[in-house]
């Protein structure tokens, strides 16, 4: 996340500041703390607390690290290390814990009560979503994959089914505007939304009826997100089998 090698837990107000910084890199590195506070409608003390979450003693240090991050990001870089493998192994252990299994079963109950499952995702998450649609179509219920949400209207689906769709959204960042706009419109029809994201602080995670987050390091190559999809695939496979057993038991 920015110049840190791991995800930072952000409150809603921190997320607002973070989004502003990410979309105004070129301005923020020249802004004084009061200017950034004014631009984001927060106090200077809130900016300082935000900086400390990014391991900075103050705003000056944050700007210095941000400038270095921008300069280093000018050339696409991707370092292959064993760290991501360790995180994946750690997550695979976590998925078998009781708390995580309880969350999976909550999602499974929503899924098996739905008449149609619609999987969505972009980029590498889209490939995982396609796999999810194949998996659930085989084991659970009628499933489909949408790769272009803004140009895939569902008004032609029968009224009965259109009131009982479960959208399963896969997104590392949970911030794709096209998907969020689509989902917020579809929720008006009383459909359910399940999301699988890297962090529970994302917009998608907050608007979903249920969310599972895996919390591993982001890996970027320029603008391309190459964060591992291993946790997502593990969640989909485990969830599909729980749904299959739940549906058969009913």
Image (cartoon, rainbow, N blue to C red):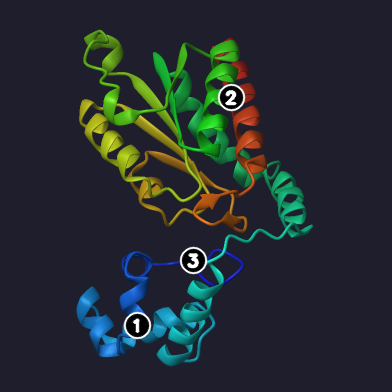
> Which of the 4 image quarters holds residue 49?
bottom left
Residue occupying the point 33% across, 79% down:
28
Marks 3 and 2, the one that precedes in the sequence: 3
Residue occupying the point 35% across, 21% down:
165
Residue wearing tag 3: 9
CA neighbours of label 1 inside 10 A, class few (<14), some (14 to 19), many (20+) = many
Pinpoint residue 129: horizontal percent, then vertical percent: 52, 29
> Which of the 4 image quarters holds residue 221?
bottom right
Discs 3/2, front:
2
Q: Say which element carries label 2.
A: helix
Residue occupying the point 76% across, 52% down:
85
Is mark 3 in CB contact (under 8 Å) with mark 2?
A: no
Q: Is residue 202 left or right of residue 127?
A: left
Pinpoint residue 127: horizontal percent, then vertical percent: 55, 30
> Alpha-carbon distance for marks 3 and 2?
29 Å
Q: Say which element carries label 1.
A: helix
In the image, 43 versus 79, the foreground residue is 79
Residue wearing tag 2: 131
Residue wearing tag 1: 47
On residue 92, the disc is none
Q: Say which element carries label 3.
A: loop
CA neighbours of label 2 inside 10 A, class few (<14), some (14 to 19), many (20+) = some
């Amino acid at each position: 996340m920015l110049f840190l090698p791991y995800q930072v837990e952000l409150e809603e107000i921190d997320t607002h500041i973070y989004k502003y910084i990410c979309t105004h890199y070129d301005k923020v590195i020249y802004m004084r703390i009061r200017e950034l506070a004014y631009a984001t409608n927060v106090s200077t003390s809130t900016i300082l607390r935000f900086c400390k979450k990014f391991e900075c003693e103050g705003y000056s240090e944050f700007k210095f690290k941000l400038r270095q991050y921008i300069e280093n990001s000018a050339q696409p870089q991707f370092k292959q290390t064993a760290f991501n493998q360790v995180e994946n192994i750690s997550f695979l252990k976590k998925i078998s814990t009781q708390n995580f299994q309880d969350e999976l079963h909550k999602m499974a109950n929503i899924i098996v009560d739905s008449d149609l499952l619609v999987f969505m995702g972009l980029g590498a998450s889209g490939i995982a979503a396609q796999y999810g649609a194949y998996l659930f179509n085989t084991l659970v219920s009628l499933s489909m994959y949408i790769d272009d949400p803004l140009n895939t209207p569902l008004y032609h689906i029968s009224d009965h089914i259109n009131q009982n769709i479960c959208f399963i959204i896969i997104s590392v960042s949970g911030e794709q505007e096209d998907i969020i706009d689509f989902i917020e419109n579809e929720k008006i029809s009383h459909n359910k939304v399940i999301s699988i994201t890297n962090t529970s602080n994302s917009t998608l995670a907050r608007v979903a009826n249920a969310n599972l987050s895996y919390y591993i390091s982001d890996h970027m190559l320029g603008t391309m997100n190459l964060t591992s999809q291993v946790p997502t695939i593990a969640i989909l496979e485990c969830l599909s089998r729980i749904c299959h057993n739940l549906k058969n038991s009913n």
